[in-house]
Each structure stands twice: as C-alpha cells, then as structure tokens.
Image (cartoon, rainbow, N blue to C red):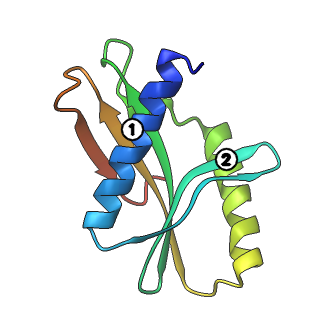
Amino acid sequence: MKTAAQQMGRKAEELAIRYFTRQGFAIMARNYRYQRAEIDIIAKKNHLLVFVEVKARSNDQFGHPEAFVTPKQQALVRAAAEHYIIAQDWNYAIRFDIIAILQQNSNHPQLTHFEDAF
C-alpha cells in the first residue's frame, strides 16, 4: 500500500505528463533510474530533450515545491541524464526543468513550470 505522499507524487507526475503532452512533447521515459538517481519524466519535442523533476506539496507552509530540489538531487539527475544521452546517442539540445505542484485544493492543483531550472 502506497503512502499518502507516494500517492500525491504519482498524481503530480500524471498531471505533469498531461501538461507536457498538451505542449506537444512526447514522453520518452518515466521514472528513469540510473544508479542512485531517478528522473521523473524525460520528454522530447523536435530536437529538444527535457529532463523533468516533479515536486509536489500539499501546501507551501514550509516553502514552495521547487525549493526542495536540492543541489545533490540536481547532480544525481544530471548524472542520470548523461547516462541516458549516451545510451540514446542524443546529439541535440537538452534542458532540465522543474514542475512544481501545489495541491492545497485537490480539485484544482496549481502547476508551475520552471524551464532551465538547473
């Protein structure tokens, strides 16, 4: 049985996937793992590959979701992205984004997209 936090994270990832799909991106991978790192979403549009970290919080009492992407986590995502790029022989542009979701009102979560976040 998943915890409430895991369920919220899963719903946030689903929302982020719908958002990227509506923006014309193809979802290449979900929860891509390399060693100790995980990339929530890898999306592609034309010659751009986007590595996405999704952060969700039920409220902003302790800070906004995007503030919880630590430098250590950024480094892990970069390492996993490098592995993915080499494995896929990708020779075009890449970007690291954050999707921050506040779910204070579960019927209308607030999604904010930070392009080139790190």
Q: Amino acid at mark 1?
A: Ala
Q: Residue at x 37, y 21 (%)?
A: 63
Q: Residue at x 42, y 27 (%)?
A: 8
Q: Residue at x 83, y 48 (%)?
A: 35
Left or right placement of residue 54 versus residue 89 in this view: left
Q: Nearer the viewer, residue 46 or 107?
A: 107
What residue does disc 1 label?
12
Secondary structure at badge 2 equals: strand
Label disc, if present, on residue 34 of the rendered structure: none
13 relative to 104, above or below: below
Query: How far from the left and from the top, in percent, is residue 42?
Result: 53, 62
Left or right placement of residue 8 versus residue 34 in this view: left
Q: Amino acid at mark 2?
A: Glu
Q: Going from the N terminus, do you reach mark 2 or mark 1 first?
A: 1
Label disc, if present, on residue 38 of the rendered structure: 2
Secondary structure at badge 1 equals: helix
